[in-house]
Image: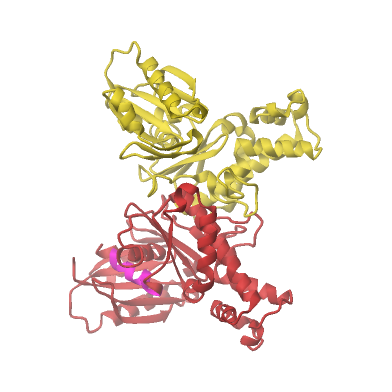
Chain colours: A red, B yellow
Amino acid sequence: MDERLTVGLDIGGTKIDAGMIDATGNIFNKIRLSTGAHEGLDTVLQKIFHAIDTVIKGIYQPIAGIGIGVPGQVDVNTGVVLFAPNLKWKYVELKKIIQEKYPLQVEIDNDANCGALAEAKLGAAQGVKSMVWISVGTGIGGGIIINNHLLRGAGFAGGEIGHITLQQDGPVCGCGNHGCMEALASGTAIIRQVKEGIMAKKRTGIVDMVDGDMSKITVSTIAKAADQGDRLASEVLNKAGQYLGIGIASIVNILNPEMVVLTGGVMEVASTYLMKPIQDTARLRVLVSIRDSLQIKLSQLHGNAGLIGTRLLILS
Amino acid sequence: MDERLTVGLDIGGTKIDAGMIDATGNIFNKIRLSTGAHEGLDTVLQKIFHAIDTVIKGIYQPIAGIGIGVPGQVDVNTGVVLFAPNLKWKYVELKKIIQEKYPLQVEIDNDANCGALAEAKLGAAQGVKSMVWISVGTGIGGGIIINNHLLRGAGFAGGEIGHITLQQDGPVCGCGNHGCMEALASGTAIIRQVKEGIMAKKRTGIVDMVDGDMSKITVSTIAKAADQGDRLASEVLNKAGQYLGIGIASIVNILNPEMVVLTGGVMEVASTYLMKPIQDTARLRVLVSIRDSLQIKLSQLHGNAGLIGTRLLILS
């Protein structure tokens, strides 16, 4: 095992996480910055440089390289970010830009691919050869590993698990399609459905919990309401779990992986209410030949999988 | 290239196709037998032996082996058919049984996997590294090739593309689930929808075309009715095409293959009516980043892909 450290960056639409990562997946010198994507490419690049400079400050051990996860399509051979809608990036030669400033190996991949790699190597899917990693947060992303290799797709656009259609005429998704899993079961969708319930005058304590300010409703608020027996909260979470279960059954029927690992902000705060309908619905809908062997687990790396996984781009 | 011949068998629920296959994928001495699956395993095995004996009769060239496609889950390492519902087989040691009688290399795989292999090597997907092969017939089956390798799944149950859910509360599928693509867009589903239209007194010439005998309605009848401007026939085919397009968009968002190839009895007789709604719907629903590069094509090997592909189990 290569014991050298790596610099890791997990670039999101709103925040950049960065840190030094050691061989066991421990993160130190971790920092978080706002991405500032709306201020344009140069601003984000300055933030990236600042993040790298900050985390390597005072490190005198050998550094093997810089791994970066990006929310979009990345040509992993050239290190070009082909398309990252949340960053408003198109064809950004990120590897080249970083290497001009730092004389180190630089590798870039999709953030969910990084997460899946980390989970398979150091998390819930250790020893598993094929798995589907699903991150349920503001949106729904995914990384797929088949026979120990990432399924990146012909145009590096594979694994977009959030964009399978569950309802032909369902709510409009951010991608433009109708009824995507993301439009029905992401954090955004869960909050929207609760707000719709409130507008439809369903009885709920959620409005009081946010002092009447509907813009303050989060999935965490909704989970807390469910803890207190709030029926609207429980119903919406249960339905989201069912949608996730339907989507997982479809994915599993296509890929027949050994394991499905669930992670992301929504799972972190609401897995108590989501896991049962997910498990029950997926098991009910999956092919009989797959049912008994299907494993659906929660992440063991929580919010750090993407950042830890950047190390595996450099040293696998 | 190995010029030796191979014996190929494509075992279906109702018929067995067998023949000698040469290096260019030509089939000769081809025969077709009824499978007789309802008479039990021994009957089917006798038919398989008879088929092999018949096709190798009079062949004095070297034979490299026997390749067999089976409609079910096959452990390709051991040659055991784990589960083939249409044959009512569970754990049949087919490779061992065949090799006891014939001193040749014997390889067995799922029939759709054979079809996908053939299409990638000799058909519409030549030169393509990742593709999804979808057979629309009585049911809907699929074979997936990623980076030139079949995606067989952890339990050899991958590629069951017909069993992605398109309608949560849709019609019951043969697999027990509701609203599978197979339950909405297979030949069986198309015929059922036409019959439902007839029962609902929709105007159609189809009843006259089968002399009032509804059991005689086939997808071919329906396509002929559409040729004559029959509105019910056109509507049902158009809707089936849309369902296929929705399913393909989901699969493509997950796998990002270079190409999707469509084949099977339904495509053979009704592609005129299906391809446009398939293409239009898939393109509309797929992620923007994939849209322009997505290729959806018809098979070039037609009904023979599965049989030709058995050769590639022996000599690839």
Magenta segment: does it hold A250?
no
Quadrant location of residue A16?
bottom left
Q: Which residue corresponds to the image point at 64% horizontal and 35% vertical from the top-left?
A: B273
Quadrant location of residue A33?
bottom left
Magenta segment: does it hold A305?
yes
Q: Is residue B206 left or right of residue B144?
A: right
Q: Which residue corresponds to the image point at 43% horizontal and 18% vertical from the top-left?
A: B30
Q: How many marks?
A: 0
Q: Depth check: give the residue in front, A154 or B167.
A: B167
Q: Depth check: give the residue in front, B199 or B93.
A: B93
Q: Position of residue A145 (x, y in %)?
A: 37, 56
Q: Which quadrant does the N terminus of chain A fall into?
A: bottom left
Identify the main secondary structure in magenta: helix
Q: Which residue corresponds to the image point at 50% horizontal and 39% vertical from the top-left?
A: B141
Up the image or down, A43 lies above or below B42; here it is below
Q: Position of residue A292 (x, y in %)?
A: 44, 53
Q: Is residue A126 left or right of residue B69?
A: left
Q: Residue furthest bottom?
A: A211
Q: Is residue A92 visible?
A: yes
Q: Which quadrant does the C terminus of chain A fall into?
A: bottom left
Q: Is residue A84 visible?
A: no
Q: Position of residue B293 (x, y in %)?
A: 48, 48
Up the image or down, B197 lies above or below A72; here it is above
Q: Position of residue A57 (x, y in %)?
A: 25, 83
Which residues are drawn in magenta? A303-312
Q: Residue furthest top?
A: B58
